[in-house]
Image (tube, helix red, strand yellow):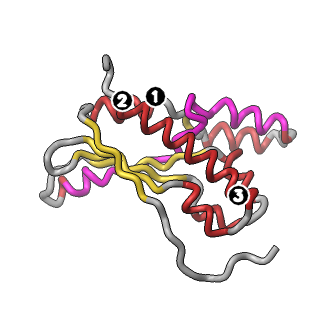
């Protein structure tokens, strides 16, 4: 199938605010993520695993959210060094097995997988979580197989963020 032409598309951007402290939100967010272990994957590749062995190893790396942490970008530290103290970290999260469900049909979906989430304190000290709705990112490809995965990712992201921002004891 031919890739979609160049063009524009709309993205649904979400901002969730919470009274829960920044440290609590980030701790809860991270507790739901597994971690992509690149060294373990390299060793696994070297052993020439079966597809089932590979899938099982990736499944074991995912957290309760179904996602794993690929990396972080600490925007807050950069801002602080340049004289604007802030707390803001971008989290790069995903799951290679979920990404495969899309990239096998359209490699261009790899531009948006893994996903990105920003957790920060705003000017008033309130904790905010921002992310783009996955189905809006992947919807541009016009492929129901990819749209289905995008909608599943919407649900996973919503649960991840809702759990992270929920004020305990309410």
Q: Left or right of 107: which side holds 112?
A: left
Secondary structure found at label 2: loop
Please provide percent x and percent y for residue 167: 31, 26
Q: State the residue in front, 47 or 148.
A: 148
Residue name at image x 64 percent, y 61 percent: 110
Of badges 1 and 3, the one in the foreground is 3
Label drawn at residue 31: 1
| Real-space Cα separation, disc 2 to disc 3, in angstroms | 30 Å
**Is disc 3 placed on a helix, strand or loop?**
helix
Residue 131: percent from left, percent from top: 43, 52
Measuring 51% from the left and 34% from the top, which residue is drawn there?
33
- Residue 120 bears which disc, if any? none
Q: CA distance from mark 2 to mark 1?
A: 14 Å
* Element under disc 1: helix
Tell me which numbered mark, 2 or 3, is placed earlier along the sequence: 3
Looking at the image, is mark 1 or mark 3 earlier in the sequence? 1
Crowd band around label 3 with a 10 angstrom C-alpha radius: few (<14), some (14–19), many (20+): many
Q: Which mark is residue 166?
A: 2
Q: Which mark is residue 146?
A: 3
Residue span colored magenta? 52-79
Q: Which quadrant of the rendered structure holds the C terminus? A: top left
Location of residue 151 in the rendering, given as x and y in whole percent from the top left corner: 62, 50
Please name which of the two marks, 2 or 1, marks the residue nearer to the observer: 2
Name, please, the residue furthest toward the top: 169
- Crowd tier of the residue under label 1, counting other residues whose Cα lies within 10 Å: few below 14, some 14–19, many 20 or above: some
């Amino acid at each position: 199938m031919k890739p979609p032409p160049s063009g524009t598309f709309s993205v649904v951007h979400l901002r969730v605010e919470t009274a829960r402290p920044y440290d609590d939100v980030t701790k809860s967010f991270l507790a739901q993520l597994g971690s992509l272990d690149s060294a373990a994957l390299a060793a696994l590749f070297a052993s020439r695993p079966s597809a089932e062995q590979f899938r099982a190893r990736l499944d074991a790396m995912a957290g309760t959210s179904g996602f794993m942490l690929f990396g972080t970008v600490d925007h807050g530290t950069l801002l602080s060094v340049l004289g604007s103290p802030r707390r803001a970290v971008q989290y790069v999260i995903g799951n290679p097995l979920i990404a495969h469900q899309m990239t096998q049909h359209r490699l261009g979906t790899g531009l948006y997988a893994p996903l990105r989430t920003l957790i920060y304190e705003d000017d008033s000290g309130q904790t905010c979580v921002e992310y783009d709705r996955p189905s809006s990112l992947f919807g541009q490809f016009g492929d129901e197989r990819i749209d289905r995965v995008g909608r599943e990712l919407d649900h996973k992201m919503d649960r991840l963020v809702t759990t992270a921002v929920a004020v305990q004891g309410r």
